[in-house]
Image (cartoon, helix red, strand yellow):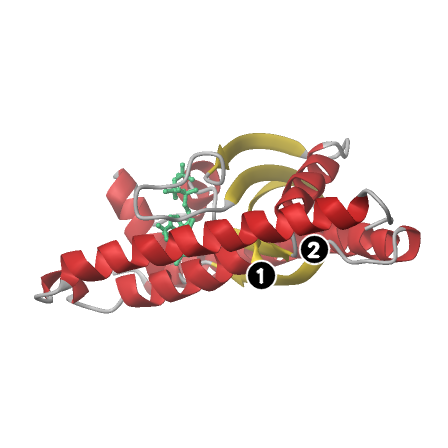
Amino acid sequence: PDPQKFINNAAKFNDLMMMYRCAIREVQTKLEVLDDEFSVEYKRNPISFIKTRIKKPESIYRKLQKLGYDFTAENIQEYLNDVAGVRVVCAFIDDIYTVANLIAGQDDIKVLKVKDYIKNPKSNGYRSYHMIVEIPVFFSKGKTPMRVELQIRTNGMDFWATLEHQLRYKKGIEDLPGYDEISAELLRSAQAVIETDNEMQRIKDKIGMFHDI
Ligand code: 0O2
C-alpha cells in the first residue's frame, strides 16, 4: 500500500463530503425560505421540521460494492444519489405536494428522479415522497452541480418509518420466531397511520372552506 495514495484519496473523500454538506445547506435554506414566507402569508407552517444527514462512509462503501463499483470519489459522485439527504416533515399530506412542487419549480433545481411512495406505498407499508434533485453549488474552483435526496413525509409517516427502520436494522431480526407476525403488525400500524393522515387532511379541508389554513 502506498501511503501517499491513501492520503490523497482520504483528502479527496473529505473534500467531496464538504461539497455534499454545502449542497444540503443550499437545499435547507430554500426550504426554510418557503416555510418562513408561508408563516407570514398564511400564518401557518407547512414544514414541522427538517432533518439532514450525510451518508456514513461505511454505508457509502456498501452501496458502491452492491452496485459493483470501487470506493472512489469519482464513483460516489457518479453513481450515488443519496449521499446528501434532507428529510422534510410536514403537518399534512397536501403540504408534501406543495413543498415538492415549489422546490421542483425553482429554476436552479433540476429534478432527476421522483418516487412517490405515498401514491404507491411499499409492500411493507412505507410511505414518503422521494425526490433526487441536482443543485448548483458555487465553490472557489467554480460551479458544481450536486445531487441531494429529499424525503418529504408527514409526521405520521416519519414516526412509522423511523421505528420500522430501527427494527429492521436490528441484527438478526428476520430470524426471530415471530418475524412474520411482526411484519404484519407493522403493516397494520402503517394502515392506522394512513387513516389518521387522511382524517387530518379531511379536517383541514373542512376548516379551509371557511377559514384560510
Ligand atoms: P438510510 O440508512 O436511511 O440511508 P435509488 O438508487 O435511489 O433508485 P434506493 O436507494 O432504494 O434506490 O432509493 P429509495 O427506494 O428511494 O430509498 C432510499 C431511502 O428511503 C432509504 O435509504 C431509506 O432512508 C428510505 N426508505 C426506503 N424504503 C424504506 C422502508 O421500507 N422503510 C424505511 N424506514 N425507510 C425506507 P437507505 O440507504 O436504505 O437507508
Q: Is residue 174 left or right of residue 16?
A: left
The front one of 202 and 140 is 202
Q: Is residue 130 left or right of residue 41?
A: left
Q: Are marks 2 and 1 in contact (CB under 8 Å)?
A: yes
Q: Residue at x 77, y 31 (%)?
A: 107
The image quadrant that residue 5 belongs to is: bottom left
In the depicted structure, whether residue 14 falls above or below residue 209? below
Q: Which residue ends up furthest to the right in the rendered image?
A: 41
Label 1: how many Cα within 10 Å (few below 14, some 14–19, many 20+): some
The front one of 25 and 31 is 31
Q: Is residue 118 left or right of residue 24?
A: left
Tell me where residue 44 appears, x and y as whole percent. Answer: 81, 58
Q: Amino acid at mark 2?
A: Gln
Q: Residue at x 43, y 60 (%)?
A: 160
Q: Which mark is residue 52?
A: 1
Label 2: how many Cα within 10 Å (few below 14, some 14–19, many 20+): some
Q: Quadrant where the N terminus lies?
A: bottom left
Q: Residue at x 71, y 50 (%)?
A: 204
The front one of 55 and 113 is 113
In the depicted structure, whether residue 115 falls above or below residue 176? above
Tell me where residue 24 appears, x and y as whole percent. Answer: 63, 54
Mark 2 vs mark 1, CA separation in Å: 8 Å
Residue that mark 2 sits on: 28
In the depicted structure, whether residue 69 falls above or below residue 189? above
Q: Secondary structure at mark 2?
A: helix
